[in-house]
Structure formats: structure tokens, C-alpha cells
Image: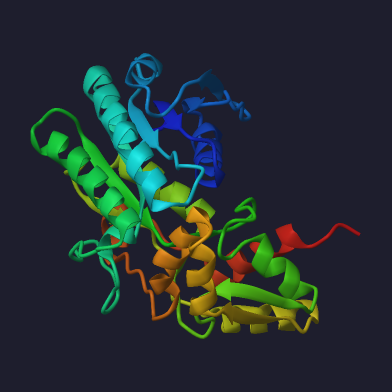
Amino acid sequence: MTGGNHLVIGAGPIGRELVHQLTERGDQVLVATRSGTRLPLAEAVTADASDAAALIGAAEGADTIFLCSNPAVYAADEWQRVWPPIFRAAIQAARSSGAGLVVMGNLYPYGKPEGPMTECSPEMTTEAKGVVRREGWAAVKAAHDAGEIRAVEVRASDYFGPGAGGTAHLGERFFGPIMASKTAYVVGDPAMPHSWSYLPDIAATLVAAADHTGPWGRVWHVPSGLPHSRHEIADTLNDWFDAHGKAAGVPQWLLAGLGLFSPQWRGVYESSYQFTAPFVLEATETERMLGVQATPWPAALRETAQSYRPLS
């Protein structure tokens, strides 16, 4: 729907890439953040994602609301406090404006996978943050099913790409040490295959989901290609950049111990099951029905690695 009018809530790595893709095709975009973040070619408004009145005002005249916000603290009790008002506010804004609501989600609702996760996998999580996300999507879908709004959720695995930031599992703290021939300490077992979602592909899936003229009220997965272990990724980077880095897992007992003193680390430990066994995302339906394809892995990985190389 080129030429559309959109509200993007959140300006993190995903929100920024989404705004870039929307404005590049000529759409009008309003970005809503607590700090009034300004991005190229987009308008900005200061609004808390949990403030329904502010979002209703910001969404007036919008064709689509993209919910790309995320709590600053990675802890279950913080998610339980912050997320429900955000979902309620987004639903109210979509209901008031008539805009389609596209929610940026993750794979937490599925819990510990016993095989590849598809768009139809059961949501079996018992982990607290996963329950928060599952219940949030359930509230959005209930409003959709009641005919109050149109909504979908796009789910991605751990993201990577230029601008992913220091907290990403495949971000600066991984690429920097590897390319400097040092050790990157990672969560879980670095030998386990893991799906990685490239930031441009995440944004492309969000856009395609918003443009979809078929039924809504469902989940889409970001096409992410084949899974890759962090040992494999380190080996590739070493070959490309004549380095000798390696990836080493932080012991689970240490993560658990850190969690006793830090809610942030407790959140990491509770979600570490994603890195202790194969964690594989499939997006067959999304590829077929939305026409989105994963960026070829070598190109995506090289582009990301180059963004972390020091300037010389």
C-alpha cells in the first residue's frame, strides 16, 4: 500500500529500520516515543506507549499502527507491569482510528521447542515473559475476532544486522571480540543451531503484513533462512577477516547466580533455554503468502560484520 499513512510506536533497531523502509517507498510516517525521537523523513510525537489517549491522538488518520515498542528492562516483573497497558492502549488506538494493528512479536509464546517453530505451532510457554507476550497477543486477537479491530502479529527470532546494538545476542558483544581474535562469551551452548532474523527482513515482513489484502487475525514469521550456531558464525568471521576469535558459553550456574542479584540477569537466565537446544524458526506460510524471502545469509552476515569493524 505505497503512499500510506502510518504510526510507528517505538524507535529501537526494528522501529528505525521499519521507518526507513516505509519512508523509502514514499509513505507518511509518524514515530511515537517517550523521548520524541526524530528519524529521517518521518514526523515525531512524544507519547508513552501505554498512554491510550496519546496513542489515539497520534493514530488519527493512520492506515496502520505498528507496535514496535519494548520495555527497557529485561525482567519478568517489569514485563508483567509494563506490557498489558501497552497492549490495551494499542487496541484502543486501533479501535478509535480504524487503523490496522501490526504487532512486532517474538518466539517466547511457544516455550521450549521440540522441533522447528511454524506459524501454527502451539503456544506452550510457562516462562513468565513468554506468558506476558502470549496473553498480549491473545487480547489483540480477541479484539480482532470480535470485529473491533484488524490485527496481526509478526514474530522473529533474535535479530541481527547493522544497528542491532550492544544487547543483541548477535550484536556488538559478539562481533567485536571475534573479529579482534578474542573470546565472545555468549548465553547457552554456542554449538547449538539457532535461527537469526535479519533486521531488514523483519521490517520487510512487517510491511508485507500491513499490505496483506487477505485475512488478518493471525501470526506471521519472519523468513530467517537456515539456522547457524555461533561456533559456525565465529569460524566464518575468522575466515573472512583473518581472525582467531571464538565463542564460549557462560555456564548456566553462573547465569542463575547472577539472576539472584539482578532482575535483568534473571530474565536472561529464564529465557536461556532458547540457546541450550536447537532453536529453529520456519516461515513457509509467510514466504508463500506474503512473498517475503530471507536475505542470503552470507550477504546479511557480511553487512553486519562490516558495520562492527573499527574505522581505520
* Residue 150 in sight: yes
Give the side of residue 200 with respect to residue 312, left or right. Answer: left
**Residue at the farthest left position:** 146
Figure check: 204 above or below 118: above
Instruction: Specify how the rendered protein is coloured.
Output: rainbow
Quadrant of image for the C terminus: bottom right
Quadrant of image for the N terminus: top left
**Residue at the farthest front position:** 261
Q: How many marks?
A: 0
28 and 309: which is toward the camera: 309
Residue 205 point in image, percent of width and height: 39, 50
Quarter-of-image position of residue 144: top left
- Residue visible at 56% across and 40% down? 16
- Residue visible at 30% across and 27% down? 89
- Residue visible at 38% across and 35% down? 66
Residue 184 point in image, percent of width and height: 67, 74
Residue 289 point in image, percent of width and height: 26, 55
Figure check: 71 above or below 226: above
* Residue 225 in sight: no
- Residue visible at 86% across and 57% down? 311
Give the side of residue 184 with respect to residue 181, left or right. Answer: left
119 and 76: which is toward the camera: 76
Residue 30 point in image, percent of width and height: 48, 23
Figure check: 141 above or below 183: above
Give the side of residue 245 with respect to residue 73, left or right. Answer: right
